[in-house]
Amino acid sequence: MLECCVPGCTGNYKTGKKIQVFSFPKDADALKQWLRAIPRKDFVPTSCTKVCADHFDASCIEKTTSYMDPRTGRVIEVALPVPWLRPGSVPTVFPGCPSYLSVRDQSTRETPDAKRSRQEASQLARAVEESLASYEAEQERDRFSSLEELRARLQGVSVSPKWTVIHKEECSMFLNIIDYRKPCLNASLTVFANLEVSACYQGSPIKNLGSAVVPDSVQKVSSLLEILNNLSMLSEERCTYRHLAQAIHSLLDKLEASIDEGKKETVNFMKEQLLLLSAKRIQYSAQVMVFACILRTISPHAYKFLRSTGALTLPHPSTIRNVCSSIQMCPQVDSSDDTFLQYVSQRFKHLQAHEHTVTLMLDEIHIKPCLDYKGRNICGAAVNSNEAATSVLVFMIQSLLSAFKEVAHILPVKTLQGEDLHCMPKKVILGLEEIGYRVIAVVCDNNSLNRKAMKMFLPEPKLSPVYQHPADPDRPLFYVVDAVHLFKCIRNNWLNQKNAGTCFFYPRFELSNNEVHPECKMTASFKHLRDLHKEESPLLLKSGHGLTSKALNPSSFERQDVKLVLQVFNPHVAEALAARKGHTDFQHATATAEFIKIILRWWSIVNVKTPSEGFHHRNVYKEPMSNHTDDPKASFLSAFITWLDVWEFYRHDTGVLTQETLSALRLSAQSLLALVKYCVSELHFKYILLGKVQTNPLESRFGQYRQMAGGQYHISVRELCETEGRIRLQNALPRMSNDDPRSIEETDSVRDAGTSFSVHVSDADLDELRAQMPVIGYVGGYCAHAAMKVLKCESCQRQLVVTGNTAETGEDTHSLIAQLDRGGLKFPSALVIAVVMYTEVVVRKLMTESTSTQFLHGPNQKNVVRQLTLDSLPRLEDIDTCENGHTYELLITLVANCAANIMLNNYCKQRNDLLRIEKDQKAKNRKARIFLGK
């Protein structure tokens, strides 16, 4: 530190004290004053010359700085880190020099501005102090600490006349009562002894009043008056939306706290819709976005209509598209290594452990070969060719122990070879196993390409029901041929027989004990089915129920429909043929019926999809399969394999299944038996549903593709991927579903529906139906069952059905029911039989040429038939009203309703058959004319 330059001063010298020093001023006049004051002759200072603080008066050195708050006049003073000289200061104290050289008590005059600022600050500070004192006094008058003080404070303030104040010992209540003629409490505010408050509106506690919050306690009269003012605004017309919305929101909070857990989502949805009404910037919750995305992917038109009504505040379609775009799929992206099986990998995270065991289904859908450009990519090219794909291979997985099923991979291809096809399912299986799935079987149809691909799972390619698993050689991989495909192949093989009568020649199979008799050959004639249909086609009630012309003569396209196969392999058809045993026109009726029953039993076993199906159908062969030694289903499948072996041994040129179909049937039965044993013994399943080991879900998905793509059969790769993306969106997001409420149709509606028709039912008309009494009895049993489901009355049940003990099973009326009954069918009473017979006659007469046009063009044909039936039917029995209030008229009306439905449905099928026959005949005539050159 530099020494002081004043003579006689030892500041900062070795022998002196350490002290602050100041530099000489740079201003010339100020420098002259400093030099004149310092007693040192001919002194010329340099930049290093300093003067210490001892030579300046204390008023010359500024050691603090101050700031005045212009709002309060308060002066804040803070010490400076380094003191500095005031402007114009001159050294005047020289202790080591003669005294006349020093000037003490040098005073400086305050400037007018500084004086004015000081005075203003002083006045302002005084005013602030007075204001604070006044505020504290006001706060003291506003504050209270007990109910007694509150009551005292309220005497000095004005409470709105809308409020009725009631003081009690434990509380003070402020009540807003409207309509004093019929008093009704609109709002209330209660202050308790501990000064806690409770605000209620319309009987419900509320915590929010617009932007304000009702406090837990109150200690100021002003706060109390503010709460009262906000409460009163809720019941006034000038009440803002915010106040009303907060009140409704509070009511919904109370509702949510008092209802079941399953209904809280509905209340939350209502609360969010309420908030969205006034939101300046709309922000939807995850639940609303999920709901909107699912609704729009299911039906864009329904979503557009719902938004247009204004009933709900939902996101704009463009917002939905942005959200859903991340789930859209593209074959090129889906096939890359980074995103291979990415979707099913995400779904795996949400599955339970028992859902990981799956089957892999494989099928091909033919598409429209085309390339299209959309969304910045070209779609439609085959993965194995540069040309457009002609088909798409779809791989789907289905859990054996849950309803989970998803498309795992989609592959557009063109002219695929067996070697290439083998690599694809192998890659998918390995990928699924790496994710965590356990693939135990491959299910596909009997296509030769599929067979060739599966053979290559062995070093020496050959067909086998079980192969080594590609992910683990110690595990089996079962090969199952799709049962639905085989079911259709059996029917097609039967249709394609070129022998007389379109017959199968098969070995006898006794279903009662599962014995096969190779020496006994049976004949199943498809011609008998056509003859049966031709015989019963004019009748409204048929013993061969379900058999149609379309099922007996399907086109190439219709042969893909399994529903038509089920019309041929039908228990009603089998019983109808068995009933014609001995007729000359039905020489092989019994053998044909037996063949149908054999295939039906096989189908019942391999098509079980629910654990309780066998219980509801009272059919042991529709129960799930297990590995029990006494399981009749396993015994049948073993005998079925033997039956196929014997049938193959016949080696006929005609009347047998094709080698491909027979081998696939045998292979499928063998693999299913091995699969059941493995699942029950090794995987410890209690049972297995064989209906899950088929490609029916995949075929159903193909139908969804076509329907969602506009109802066209041949769709493009782009359309397939877009529809799969929408389906994945629906499956990936949580679904909201409610059971549709079922309403019972009023039975007394349209009383005058049949007044414009005149129908008379005579005894001769009823006599014509005597030959159809078994079928009428069966229909009557169903009508009685339908009426009982509605009535749920034991008294009425005694009027509609007869018990098994009193039913005469030998009688023609109940004979068909007795043959088909397994304990659940109903034997109708005479009253029900009469209603069904009268309904049949009425429908038959309405279909005559004189009335059919008017009837078909009129509205509500069922009500017309029902009313005419009731008008024609005499009162057959004296039935009183039961204890539940069910009248005789109600009973017969319910039966007539069901009977009319059956008759009109059968009539429509009958007309459709005639139209089809007419169409086919026209096509034959046209081809004949072309052939003859006419």
Image (cartoon, rainbow, N blue to C red):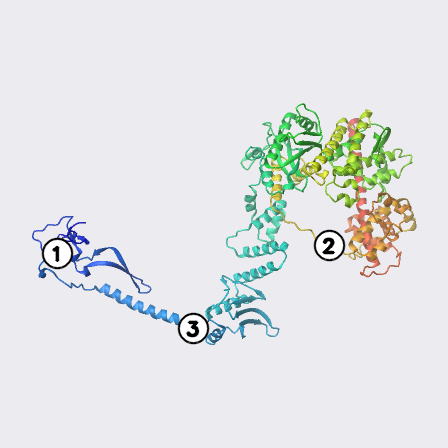
Q: Which residue is mark 1?
A: 33
Q: Marks 3 and 2, how far apart in space? A: 68 Å
Element assignment for label 3: helix
Q: Which residue is mark 3?
A: 141
Q: Is residue 229 left or right of residue 256?
A: left
Earlier in the chain: of badge 1 and badge 2, it is 1
Q: Position of residue 864 (x, y in %)?
A: 80, 52
The answer to which of 11 and 427 lies nearer the viewer is 11
Q: Position of residue 786 (x, y in %)?
A: 80, 51
Q: Position of residue 192 (x, y in %)?
A: 52, 70
Q: Is residue 64 above or below residue 854?
A: below
Q: Quadrant of residue 127?
A: bottom left
Q: Which residue is mark 2?
A: 743
Q: Quadrant of residue 363?
A: top right
Neighbor class of circle 1 (other Cα within 10 Å; few <14, some 14-19, many 20+) is some
Residue type, label 2: Ser
Q: Nearer the viewer, mark 3 or mark 1?
A: 3
Q: Assess whether mark 1 and mark 3 are in contact (beta carbons under 8 angstroms).
A: no
Element assignment for label 2: loop
Residue at image coords 29%, 68%: 123
